[in-house]
């Protein structure tokens, strides 16, 4: 007969798995749109690069037309549905209903970022190459590309980068200088930074690292520099649905997150795709 009868203690509170749970990008793109039916139309308007003119020989001022480009974004329905029987909820560790609701929202938020990244990846302005180590010079190259295209270097520029890109930048003296960096994640322990992704504002550019960019961990990683007006993201006016319910007849609980949404590249010159090598930190 055994001398000991050990009891197994299970923690009632669950620990969240490592995964992206919120959208990191929707605030960095244009989200206003006129939605009719299944499409949203973003209007990009400008002079078309016109130059000032003098009066003609007839004494009249030559007239011109404005450039109005309508970009149509087709919305699709996206869902995530979790279902668990009453017995599974009863017999499983932790608050399974809360877990269901949290995971469904995480899936939809990741889809928002995925749509935006997919559209960014269709941009044709590219710098760098496979095997290129990220440097301040590579950042400046992207900046010059956008400036040459008359993209305003205002507070609406984002560098969406691979973790390796940021790791290299953080080692550069120019990046570490307080003379250039306005927003510093490592400054103090302010509660405003708790439970938030770290972000920098350097050279008036918001820098966000993202775990789900193309070719992560390879010699040909892709990062993006873009202006807010270069990408549009549209969602239905009712917003994201996240119902939680219970079916008495079949004795199961469910949680569903749904949203009708889509993304669209609006101005190609406002996006620079940066190819670089992040394999050393993979």
Image (cartoon, grey):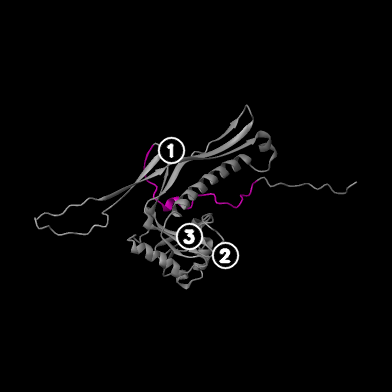
Q: Which residue is mark 1?
A: 238
Q: Which residue is mark 2?
A: 279
Residue 10 in the image: state x and y as whole percent. 71, 46
Contact flag, marks 1 and 3 (Cβ < 8 Å): no
Q: Which residue is mark 3?
A: 223
Q: Nearer the viewer, residue 136 or 98?
A: 136
- Which residue does the image show at 17% across and 59% down from the upper left? 53
| Above or below, 46 relative to 84 | below
**Mark pair 3, 2: CA separation:** 14 Å
Decide which of tag 1 and tag 2 comes sooner along the chain: 1
Q: Is residue 23 magenta?
A: yes
The stretch in magenta equals 13-36
Q: Determine the secondary structure under disc 1.
A: loop
Local crowd at mark 3 within 10 Å, few (<14), some, or many (≥20)? many
Does residue 228 appear left or right of residue 67 in this picture? Answer: right
Decide which of tag 1 and tag 3 comes sooner along the chain: 3
Q: Determine the secondary structure under disc 3.
A: strand
- Which residue does the image show at 49% across and 38% down from the upper left? 241
Q: Determine the secondary structure under disc 2.
A: helix
Residue 224 in the image: state x and y as whole percent. 45, 59
Does residue 235 appear left or right of residue 103 in this picture? Answer: left
């Amino acid at each position: 007969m055994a001398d000991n009868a050990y009891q197994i203690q299970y923690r009632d509170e669950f620990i969240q798995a490592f995964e992206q749970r919120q959208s990191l990008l929707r605030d960095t793109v244009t989200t206003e749109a006129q939605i009719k039916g299944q499409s949203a139309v973003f209007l990009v308007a400008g002079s078309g690069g016109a130059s000032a003119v003098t009066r003609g020989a007839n004494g009249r001022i030559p007239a011109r037309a404005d450039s109005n480009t309508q970009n149509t974004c087709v919305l699709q329905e996206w869902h995530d549905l979790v279902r668990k029987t009453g017995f599974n909820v009863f017999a499983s560790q932790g608050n399974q209903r809360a877990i269901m609701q949290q995971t469904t929202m995480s899936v939809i938020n990741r889809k928002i970022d995925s749509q935006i990244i997919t559209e960014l990846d269709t941009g044709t302005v590219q710098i760098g190459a496979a095997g290129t180590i990220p440097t301040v010079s590579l950042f400046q190259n992207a900046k010059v590309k956008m400036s040459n295209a008359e993209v305003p270097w205002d507070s609406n520029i984002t560098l969406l980068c691979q973790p390796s890109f940021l790791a290299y930048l953080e080692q550069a003296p120019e990046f570490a200088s307080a003379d250039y960096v306005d927003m510093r994640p490592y400054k103090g322990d302010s509660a405003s930074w708790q439970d938030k992704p770290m972000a920098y504002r350097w050279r008036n550019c918001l820098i966000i690292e993202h775990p789900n960019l193309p070719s992560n961990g390879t010699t040909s990683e892709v990062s993006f520099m873009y202006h807010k007006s270069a990408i549009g993201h549209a969602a239905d006016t009712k917003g994201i649905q996240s119902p939680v319910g219970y079916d008495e007849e079949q004795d199961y609980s469910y949680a569903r997150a749904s949203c009708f949404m889509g993304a669209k590249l609006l101005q190609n010159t406002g996006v620079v795709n940066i190819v670089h090598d992040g394999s050393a930190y993979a």
